[in-house]
């Protein structure tokens, strides 16, 4: 858990600068590159299982619940743990989830507890869906991002 919280703290510091790197949220996964081309390559080769664990621990979710959010069946997740690496499409879903968590952290000015509570509570603006569940598809993730943007700027829902 300490490593996961260290990653959250790194993201908080990045947000506190007022102009975080474009892909600041990758810090939640323990990644240190913010360049799109390098992130693309990392996703294509498959992120480490440890990256998944870092985000899971930061969100303080049971493995089974987190596996649902990244849409990896439990037996497959056990195989990925043994191999130490995710497949590219799984890595892409994990990166998408970290982007949503990062934006929620931004919305709540680095408050992990507040961001986590919001992400795990049904939201009327999402047809009473839970943001982390709704973000399971790209179109859903974009809607969650749009909602966070509206909330950040005080735009009526």
Image (cartoon, helix red, strand yellow):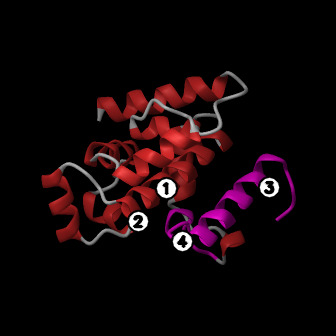
Q: Earlier in the sequence, mark 3 or mark 4?
A: 4
Tell me whether circle 3 and circle 4 mark residues in contact (CB < 8 Å): no
Which residue is depicted at the point 42% across and 35% down? Answer: 31
The residue indicated by pointer 4 is 137
Q: Secondary structure at mark 2?
A: helix
Q: Is the C terminus in the top left, top right, bottom left or bottom right quadrant?
A: bottom right
Distance between mark 2 and mark 4 Cα atoms? 10 Å
Number of residues whose C-alpha sits closer than 10 Å to that of mark 3, classed few (under 14), some (14–19) or many (20 or more): few
Question: In this image, 126 relative to 134: left or right?
Answer: right
Q: Secondary structure at mark 4?
A: loop
Which residue is depicted at the point 83% across and 47% down? Answer: 153
Q: Earlier in the sequence, mark 1 or mark 4?
A: 1
Which range is magenta? Answer: 128-157
In this rendering, the answer to whether 147 lies above or below 109 is below
Q: Which is more foreground, mark 3 or mark 1? A: 1
Q: Earlier in the sequence, mark 3 or mark 1?
A: 1
The residue indicated by pointer 1 is 97
Q: Nearer the viewer, residue 50 or 115?
A: 50
């Amino acid at each position: 858990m300490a490593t996961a919280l260290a990653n959250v703290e790194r993201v908080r510091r990045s947000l506190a600068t007022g102009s975080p790197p474009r892909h600041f949220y990758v810090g939640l996964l323990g990644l240190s590159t913010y360049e799109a081309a390098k992130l693309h390559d990392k996703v294509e080769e498959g992120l480490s299982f440890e990256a998944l664990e870092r985000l899971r621990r930061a969100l303080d979710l049971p493995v089974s619940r987190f596996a649902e959010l990244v849409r990896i069946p439990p037996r497959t997740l056990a195989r990925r743990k043994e191999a130490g690496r995710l497949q590219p499409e799984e890595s892409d879903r994990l990166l998408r989830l970290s982007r949503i968590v990062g934006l929620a952290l931004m919305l709540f000015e680095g408050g992990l507890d507040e961001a986590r509570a919001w992400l795990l509570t049904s939201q009327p603006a999402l047809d009473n869906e839970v943001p982390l569940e709704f973000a399971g598809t790209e179109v859903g993730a974009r809607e969650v991002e749009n909602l966070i943007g509206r909330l950040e700027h005080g735009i009526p829902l």
